[in-house]
Amino acid sequence: MNYQIYLLPSARRDVDCFRGKLFDRLCEAIRRLAKNPRPFGSQKLTDDGGYRIRIGDYRMLYRIDDKGKKVFVYKIRHRREVYK
C-alpha cells in the first residue's frame, strides 16, 4: 500500500522556489516517497525524529507516520541552510 504525501506549508513555499530540472527531480523524489518512505540513501535525523534525503545539493526533510501510512514533508532547502 502506498503512503500519502503531505507537503506542509513551509515545504510548499520551498517548492515554489525551484524551476527546471531541479524542480522535476524534486517532484520525482516526492512521488517515490509514496512507494518507499525509507529509500536507499535516506538518513534518520537524531534531533527531531525525521528523515532526510539528498537531491543534489538540496535536502528534503520529512516525517513518517507508518500507522496512518502518511509522509509529511516539512522542509526542502540547500544543504547549507536546511538544518538552521
Image (tube, helix red, strand yellow):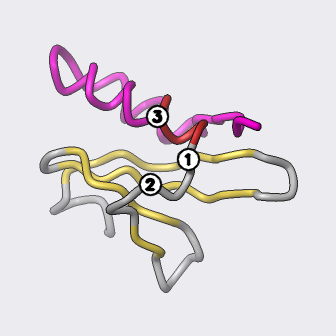
**Residue beneath the point at 60% across and 39% down:** 8
According to the picture, the residue beneath numbered tag 2 turns out to be 39
Residue at the far right in the pictured view: 67
**Residue beneath the point at 49% across and 65% down:** 51
**Magenta highlight on residue 65:** no
- The answer to whether marks 2 and 1 mark residues whose Cβ atoms lie closer than 8 Å is yes
Residue 65 position within the rendered picture, expressed as x and y whole percent measured from the top left = 75, 57
Residue 50 position within the rendered picture, expressed as x and y whole percent measured from the top left = 55, 68
**Amino acid type indicated by mark 2:** Pro
According to the picture, the residue beneath numbered tag 1 turns out to be 36
According to the picture, the residue beneath numbered tag 3 turns out to be 30
Numbered mark located on residue 49 in the image: none
- Residue 48, placed above or below residue 20: below
Q: Which residues are magenta?
A: 1-30
**Amino acid type indicated by mark 3:** Ile
**Magenta highlight on residue 25:** yes
Assign the N terminus to one quadrant of the image: top right
Residue at the far top in the pictured view: 20
Q: CA distance from mark 2 to mark 1?
A: 6 Å
- Position of 29 compared to 1: left or right? left
- Position of 1 compared to 82: left or right? right
